[in-house]
Image: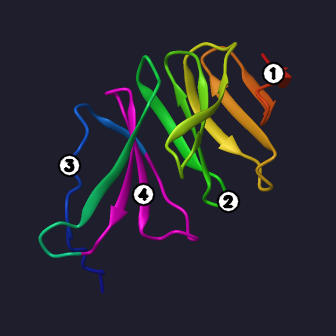
């Protein structure tokens, strides 16, 4: 028998296509959405029948499409990659950028290591391994 899925709600807030979403089991009521409108929205799920989620804050700083976003394993930080050629490390408590990583072309994919001490980015030209201070440690061409 096939499981039946039911639409519970639609989150509205971006002015462009949503390119990625991120969740974490530690904070099941939080979702991050990245968009071609150059922003990331942090949502609080309410599970209310009339409004399933509320935008908590918009993370702004990229100057081009945000292509990827992930949440650190402790839920305190987010990492985003953009076609502006940068990665940004965001403090989710304040909504501010704590680090900006430069030196690559359009960033397509980002990830934290399991201990949150290293960052990997995939772009149009390279794969890079960074430390959380913004220093590129290795490049694969």
Which of the two discs, 1 and 2, labels the residue nearer the N terminus? 2
The span from disc 3 to disc 2 (Cα, nearest Å) is: 26 Å
Residue at the location (24% across, 79% down)?
Answer: 4
CB-based contact (under 8 Å), mark 3 and mark 4: no
Instruction: Give the percent coordinates (x, y) of residue 108.
Output: 55, 28
Quadrant in the rendering for residue 141:
top right
Residue under numbered circle 2: 73
Which of the two discs, 3 and 2, labels the residue nearer the N terminus? 3
Neighbours of disc 2 within 10 Å: few (<14), some (14-19), many (20+): some
The span from disc 1 to disc 2 (Cα, nearest Å) is: 25 Å
CB-based contact (under 8 Å), mark 4 and mark 2: no
Residue under numbered circle 1: 140
Disc 2 element = loop
| 23 falls in the magenta region | yes
Disc 3 element = loop
Residue under numbered circle 3: 12
Disc 4 element = strand
Q: Is residue 73 above or below residue 126?
A: below
Magenta part of the chain? 21-47
Q: How many numbered marks, from 0 up?
A: 4
Residue at the location (37% across, 46% down)?
Answer: 57
State left or right for residue 136 relative to residue 35. right
Q: Is residue 64 above or below residue 69?
A: above
| 141 falls in the magenta region | no
Which mark is in front, 1 or 2?
2
Residue at the location (42% across, 18% down)?
Answer: 64
Which of the two discs, 4 and 2, labels the residue nearer the N terminus? 4
CB-based contact (under 8 Å), mark 4 and mark 1: no
Which of the two discs, 1 and 3, labels the residue nearer the N terminus? 3
């Amino acid at each position: 028998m096939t499981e039946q899925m039911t639409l519970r709600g639609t989150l509205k807030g971006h002015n462009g296509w949503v390119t990625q979403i991120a969740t974490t089991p530690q904070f099941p009521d939080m979702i991050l959405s990245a968009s071609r409108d150059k922003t990331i929205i942090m949502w609080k799920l309410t599970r209310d029948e009339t409004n399933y989620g509320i935008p908590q804050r918009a993370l702004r700083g990229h100057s081009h499409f945000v292509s990827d976003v992930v949440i650190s394993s402790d839920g305190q930080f987010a990492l985003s990659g953009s076609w502006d050629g940068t990665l940004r490390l965001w403090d989710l408590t304040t909504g501010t950028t704590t680090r900006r990583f430069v030196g690559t072309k359009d960033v397509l994919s980002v990830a934290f290591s399991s201990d949150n001490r290293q960052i990997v980015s995939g772009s149009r030209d390279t794969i890079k391994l960074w430390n959380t201070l913004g220093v590129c440690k290795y490049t694969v061409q």
